Amino acid sequence: MSVRTGRRVGGVRRGTGDRVMISGFDGFCADASVFWRANTLASSESDPVILVEAMSQDLRVTVRNLTVANALRRIVPARLVVFTGSDEDWNDILWTYFDKDVLTRLARAYGAVDVVDIHELVDQRVSGAPPEELVVAGARFPAELPRSGIKPEVLDQIVRATTCRVLRVPRLTPEQQAGPKYRRIRHRSEQFSHLYDALVSGLRPVALVSSHVDYDHWGLAVESAQRLDVPVIHVQSTGGLKAYALFPDRRRGAETFRAELTVQVAEYFEKHVWPKRDLLRRSAEQVTWRSKGNLGRPSWWRGGNGAVLELRTAADRRVVRRHAMARFGFDPDRPVVVVYNHAVSDALNTNVETFPDLGAWFEQTAEFAAGRTDVSWLMIDHPQQSLYDTSGFFDRVARRHAAYRHLAFRPSSQVSKNVVWSLADLALTVRGSVSNELPAYGIPAIQAGWSEWSGCGFTRVARDVADYWWLLEDAIGALACGRPLLTGEELERARLWAWFYRSGADVNSSLVQHWEMGQSAALFRALRVAMRNIEPDADPAFTAVRRMWTRREPFLTRFDLSQPDELLADLVGCPGAAGDPATERPCLSMDPVP
Amino acid sequence: MTDPRFLTMFDAPVPPAGLPVALTSGTDAALQLADGLFRGDGLVGRVTHPDALAGVRVAVPAGVRSVRVVVTLAVDDASPRWWDERVPEEVPRRRPTAPRLIHVLSQGESRAVTMLRRSAADRGRPTCTVVTFDLAGTELDPDGLLVVELRSVSDRLPPWAAAQVLPYSAVGVRVDRIDVVARPSAAVSATGHLAGGSLPVVRGRRGAEIDLRPGFFVANPGPAATPVWTLRPVLRSPERPMRYRRHTWRRTAHRKAARVAKELLPDTAIPTVRRGIDLYRTARTELRNRPVRELMPAAVAHTGTVTAIRPAAVPATRGAGPLAGLLGSLVTAGWLQAEAFEIGTAAAVEVDVSVDRGRVRIRPVRPMTGPVLVRVRSASGPPARYPVGWRLSSVPEGSPERSEESAR
């Protein structure tokens, strides 16, 4: 959903003339080229293509996209067509070392027959110069492309979301909507849509592989593919190899890509994960246990020693809570609701949202909070807000409510997990990852919108604005009278989703390495070692993509969750049947805690 | 209220530490919670955020009705760098020697405000303060933690203090150790912690004295409702490491003597405190005639080759005689005043000032309700950075008295 700002790390640095220099990159490309030629089906000019996006500066993203596409080329003979490029807006707000040349070389090494600079094509078309005939992977496209079939309201929405992101504002004012930035993005978006429509309908790709599904240059490609019934694989920029997929024949009719995904994820979870909870419990507990040291998923939001949960017992929480209450000047006897503000311009309205925009949700919740003195309210800003807001949104809302002593506004960097979690009796978010984290540790969460897991049954999801206020009233009432808001089942579901997110749907393949390897010389060395030395049979990336593709499943899975229980038990190291001494000791080096 | 479930089946039990607890390392398993605190090896940790928490799992045996907690804090050569790297850009930078006020809380209650103030001559070694407080057995939950919170104090102070103290004061501070020992009685009372920026130093028959490095001190409520704080004036050398040379030192001492006269006796004061002038002359003569050995710095920072010396302090006069009269005259004439302010509200606290045998004695008029900042000032303006300094000699019972050697 969000785009990470690139950071120069390890062996990747910006050279002279904006060239990215990576030590060993040429050698890596040579090895990759040999490896993929040997490990994909031979294709001819008559074979269809797979469209792959390469519009992120971070090479880990493109390596993932290309690896998934090539895994697909082991199943379907197809040719790779990669589209790349950037424009001044994205260079301005996000990229610091975007290098088309490096991305092109990477794409070629992975077997791309054509690399199209989609931004350059759009630039030409908006400049007013007479367009030229376009040839992609042997297919000819006329200079005058037919108009895209996108619905006007869908285009409007994508243009609005992109403009908000580019301007870094929570919503557009009438002036901004009439301004040059909006006009420019609108003009370019129309051209993007014409081009993507032409490419998708002209090339009839087997699939579109993209790291992002929002905003103009990504979102419109996904929109065209979905409308023209092409499967879309959305590769994630975190973990090992994670990807979601939507197949046209599996569509449930939800409005957006992400909404569709929410529905399908929920169905899968109900069908394949929840029934296996006894087998997966030990793994889910382990993920939950390990998550205490890194509670900032997606992992790039925040880390370090402010993101660690060290509280263990109710007494621990009570004593830290006393300190925390005093810090914020809260009445120690009142429950505390924690409101997690979002990155306010992040992918607006790309999933179901109860309020018109993320900012409106936060403002109206703060208004409501001001009138509810029976609870204290801790309002926390998003850790990376500076990348998403230049309008001072959070501070503005904070100033508006400065007089209320039962409200405290803090940037995320100023509050630790221990302190916030000692206070949180209820969490509010639209789609933040806190709505998985907190329920996994027994703290209820209300969502004013959908997220990947919002259908998995461990959060209260508002149907509409009235329902949101009702849920909030009801929860506050429950806190006051001590009625539990989270059942044991919901807690278990939350832990299972945590397991699924970090393990079940995270494929560990040496062909991509874990995200935490960074974008370093070490990463490319590890990839070369894998390509040169590890025989590729049954590589998890290949088997996972095959499973997803042939079964039309909505994501990659580390292993087949539908296989018989005894095989599953082997895979997750479940210590066997009841009565087995191993069952009594879930981990050899540790004693179970009752 | 929500009752979370933080434990998983993989959380191994943490055995609590038995009394007495001597926590000296961040790797000790008993340090369950290190929040805003970077765990150390050889020290408990170093504070990384404006407010930090250390939580220790302590087992209090049946029969122990209260415990004493001793928290040793320090700043060292690395502290300014830790501070500089962690506070927001817009925070005004201060000199590394700016005083740091730190509020120490435990089990949700305020225990004391302490102060750390580094001197340039402390280079190469930490500057410490030790905060002691007692907890009733009922304040410790057998399943819970003993929590020590360090909170930065820089606002709601009188303007002269706010202008001096370091904002985000806890950032970069070392938590060197946390000790917990059993006490025999159930009754606990405040310990009346006094802080002048560094540890009290034992000086012969004078007993423990706290060097008031920034010219003011912090006093916390103690067993006495209206305690008496006794100050002794001293002459200071300029605050920078100096190469030791005997003849230079003698010249400096003489210059200092001249300065102290100017400091304590502004020109306009001379007619009203004529007797003081005479006594000042006596004091100056005495200084001039004193053997150089006595004027040498009280402690030398390094053994072996002498490269740096501590800011030297020498008595303004010997004994009580002449200075008693001088100080008495100054107080009577209103040239020497003491003032106190409550920390957290900056409200003025009324104090009595008297002079007794060469010492200034300050006493709050009404019982103390919270920690206060106290300073002595001459009516001619703000307190001088040098050469007049004060030593607080009323170190209350219960404060650990450490010799200079053991403080290192």
Image (cartoon, rainbow, N blue to C red):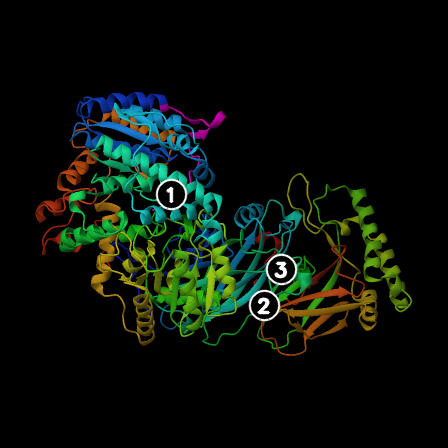
Image quadrant where one finds the C terminus of chain A: bottom left
As shown in the figure, which amino acid type bears the numbered disc 1?
Val
As shown in the figure, which amino acid type bears the numbered disc 3?
Pro
**What residue did someone put label 2 on?**
B344
Q: Pick the residue in front: A441 or A90.
A: A90
- Residue at disc 1, secondary structure: loop
**What residue did someone put label 3 on?**
B200
CA distance separating discs 2 and 1: 43 Å
Where residue A459 appears, as percent x and y from the top left, is: 27, 61
State the image quarter where residue B264 is shown. Answer: bottom right
Q: Which residues are magenta?
A: A1-25
| Mark nearer the viewer, 1 or 3 | 1
Q: Is residue B306 above or below residue B187?
A: above
State the image quarter where residue A142 is shown. Answer: top left
Where residue B101 appears, as percent x and y from the top left, is: 59, 60
Q: Which badge, 2 or 3, is on the more N-terminal residue?
A: 3
| Mark nearer the viewer, 2 or 3 | 2
- Residue at disc 3, secondary structure: loop
Residue B78: within the magenta?
no
Residue at left offset 21%, top offset 38%: A230
- Residue at disc 2, secondary structure: loop
